[in-house]
Image: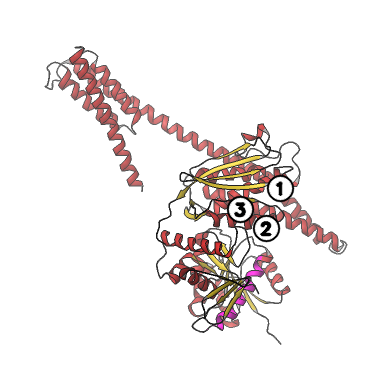
Amino acid sequence: MDRANRCIKMIKNTVIMIVVLAAVFGISVALQNTFSIEEHITTVFVFAVFIISILTDGYIYGIISTVISVLGINFAFTFPYFAFNFTIPENALSAIVMVIISLITSALTIQIKRWETLKAEGDKEKMRANLLRAVSHDIRTPLTTIYGSSSAILENYGTLTDEQKRNLIDGIKQDSEWLVRIVENLLSVTKLDGGNIKLIKTPTMLDELIDSVFIKFKKRYPSQEVILDLPDGNVFILIDAILMEQVLVNILENAVQHAKGMTELKLKVFVISGKAIFEISDNGCGIEKDKLSRLFTGQIIHDESETDNQKRNAGIGLSVCASIIKAHGSRIYAENLKTGGALFCFELDTEEMDNEQ
Amino acid sequence: MNNKYKILLVEDEKNIQTFVSALLEANGYKVLIANDCASGKIMYSSHIPDLVILDLGLPDRDGSVLLAYIRQNDLTPIIVLSARSDENEKVKMLDAGANDYVTKPFGTAELLARVRACLRNRRQSSSKTGALTGIFTAKDLEIRYESRRVFIRGEEIKLTQTEYNILTYLSENADKVMTYSAIISAVWRETPNEGNIKRLQVNMANMRKKFGTKPGDITFIINELGVGYRLVADN
């Protein structure tokens, strides 16, 4: 895989070099023949070397093209024509200048590329930091309940009534369930961590994915009806099934927890030219404008009034969705519907079904 | 009178030991506890339990070693407990002979259901002899093996040859997760690849359509995403 990549890169770079040099050579011949301009040909070649150094990776192509240019100019465009002669000082000088220019340009472009990767890593680091902050903030509450309630039961076993004990234990159970969900999300993130994404993409049948999602979702929210609209026929999508299941459960769960006044929750999937488009919509209160842009960044840690239990899970779930979808080479969008409520949308590649039944 | 099922729990975490054994004992099972792989082996050989609940992360060796040891000679049902929630691990353990797989953290209801299913499965397989005969029922499903006919709520469903073969294979291994590769090698006698896994999924989808099940329905065939299928014989 790595070797093939390197090979492709090499071919790409070589092609760029040859094309640019050929173009410049053509321009120079034209300049010389039609306009009889000779003194600027060196400048044109210097420019070509500059372009090649920018477009290719590393020093080597810039230097090769410098050598070719120097030889080419010397051979074809300077006196004596069609012969090599480096004894004339102008020729030697222009050769040296071109070598220096190509070295400096290559060094600069390498610097810029390195800076760009650093910046990308910085962004990822920032997202991870946001997530960590959100999580450590959010797990404190359930842990307090679990720790406090269990201690209360142990230390006051004789004095608490059965009903009080039952309530405390109920609280422990609920908050542990909530912790389980947080951990599921965190596990998904660690799977995506560290640059080398460990996605296990397999062709997955759409209705099996949805089936799995619905069973999980109904277990948590038995009373929440979800309207389902699937395409006919067998649709295979190339995904990491467990992670994608997490995405859909998170989005549905997000609607239940945050779309106030929702009476209708809908999941629609349709296929357009080889892409499966997923749309999850509700008719609840919609998303506040200022939150819309930060929705997937993990930055919405309960601000202001959001101290209600149900509200804790906000930022994490959606930012996990965004990372998973991104790792699948796509993007997730959210918008408010004109009719009220919010819409979440993303698309995934489908797989051709080979007709070997 | 001592006809309680004996369950061997191989787990090193004290707290998990406590709650799992409390849960099982409260439901009428006898629980034996081993702290590591080595004592698990000894306990297994000396007590011959009806079921083993096996944690994978044990202090001395990986739990899969004990799994392989038990499977050398015995078909005793084994439920694997693991903190690792990836499908590959699941498939590996199931193909190595585990009957079921529960990911930590798990709910008590979930564990009990699996235990019951495994013990039921054991009764069936111990009474099984050669060719399939009689009638198999699970929820709405009824398979009449001799006439090769399938009914849902009393209504006959026409299945293709392949669909019928898959369904009977699942019914023979009821209550057990059958991995894609297990089904493919049993039904098509092929080594699994992307193509025949898809073929299997298409067959399953067609069967679901014929049975009239919609996504999210909890029915007799449970789809274990990325792993395989399980036919639930909950009587």
Question: What amino acid does circle 3 point to?
Answer: Glu
Left or right: A57, with A126 as reference point: left
**Which secondary structure is most common in the magenta stretch?**
helix
Question: What amino acid does circle 2 point to?
Answer: Lys
The residue wearing badge 3 is A184
Q: Residues within 10 Å of mark 2 (few under 14, many from 20)?
A: few
**Segment colored magenta:** B110-129
* Residue ID at (34%, 25%): A105
* Disc nearer the start of the sequence (3/2): 3
Using the rendered image, report if marks 3 and 2 lie on a common chain. yes
Pinpoint the chain carrying mark 1.
A
Task: Identify the element where label 2 is drawn.
Answer: helix
* Disc nearer the start of the sequence (3/1): 1
**Callout in the foreground (3, 1):** 3
**Callout in the foreground (1, 2):** 2
* Disc nearer the start of the sequence (1/2): 1
- Examine the image and state in which quarter residue A279 appears: top right
- Examine the image and state in which quarter residue A80 appears: top left
Pinpoint the chain carrying mark 2.
A
Disc 3 to disc 1, C-alpha distance: 17 Å
Question: What amino acid does circle 1 point to?
Answer: Arg
**Callout in the foreground (3, 2):** 2
Residue B95, image x and y in percent?
Answer: 48, 68
The residue wearing badge 2 is A219
Disc 3 to disc 2, C-alpha distance: 16 Å
Residue B211, image x and y in percent?
Answer: 57, 65
Q: Can I make out residue B61 in this image?
A: no
Task: Identify the element where label 1 is drawn.
Answer: helix
The residue wearing badge 1 is A140
